[in-house]
């Protein structure tokens, strides 16, 4: 019987050694997994910050572009308000051809004084050239 208890003791020690070895291996795997997780977490935080920085830059560029676009739209609106249509010029040419004074072109067609004078001068030159032809 002493041999049996010795065998059982050896088996118990072997089981303890296997269990201890298993626990050490498990601890090593968990430690490695934790290191990999921490590395991935650091990379994720870095990438996340870079993404937010890029997003902020894009947002600022969009804001600037919108501001410039709104300014251009405003300028175009102002130009359209102050630029007579081609129909207005045709009507002004018609009036000038009938001998209307410069002031009438300014008042009736909304032209500037310079535009009205130019149209009147052109019409006078055209009429003179038609008479001499």
Image (cartoon, rainbow, N blue to C red):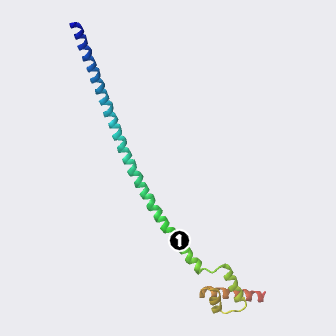
Which is nearer the eye, 77 or 126? 77
Is 127 left or right of 32, judged from the image as shown?
A: right
> Picture coordinates of residue 110 (x, y %)?
62, 86
Which is nearer the eye, 122 or 22? 22
Is residue 54 shown above or below 88? Answer: above
> Picture coordinates of residue 83 (x, y %)?
60, 79
Total number of numbered discs in the rendering: 1
Count residues near mark 1 (Cα–Cα under 10 Å), then give few for <14, some for 14-19, many for 20+. Answer: few
Is 64 left or right of 88, judged from the image as shown?
A: left
| Residue at x 64%, y 86% (from the top left corner) | 109
> Picture coordinates of residue 10 (x, y %)?
24, 13
- Residue 87's quadrant in the figure? bottom right
Q: Residue furthest front?
A: 1
| Residue at x 33%, y 31% (from the top left corner) | 29
Q: Quadrant of the C terminus?
A: bottom right
| Residue at x 67%, y 79% (from the top left corner) | 86
Is residue 128 shown above or below 54? Answer: below
Secondary structure category for the residue under label 1: helix
> Picture coordinates of residue 71 (x, y %)?
50, 71
Is residue 78 shown above or below 53? Answer: below
Q: Residue furthest right?
A: 133
Q: Quadrant of the N terminus?
A: top left
Is residue 47 shown above or below 75? Answer: above
- Residue 5's quadrant in the figure? top left
Residue pointed to by mark 1? 72
Which is nearer the eye, 113 or 86? 86
| Residue at x 56%, y 75% (from the top left corner) | 77
Q: Residue furthest left?
A: 2
């Amino acid at each position: 019987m002493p041999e049996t208890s010795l065998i059982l003791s050896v088996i118990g020690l072997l089981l303890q050694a296997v269990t201890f070895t298993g626990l050490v291996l498990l601890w090593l795997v968990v430690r490695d997994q934790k290191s990999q997780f921490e590395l991935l977490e650091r990379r994720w935080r870095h990438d996340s910050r870079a993404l937010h920085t890029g997003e902020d830059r894009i947002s600022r560029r969009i804001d600037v572009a919108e501001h410039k676009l709104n300014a251009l739209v405003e300028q175009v609106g102002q130009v359209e308000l102050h630029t007579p249509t081609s129909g207005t010029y045709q009507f002004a040419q018609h009036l000038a051809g009938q001998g209307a004074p410069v002031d009438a072109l300014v008042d009736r067609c909304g032209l500037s004084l310079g535009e009205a004078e130019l149209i009147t001068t052109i019409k006078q030159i055209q009429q003179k050239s038609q008479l001499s032809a």
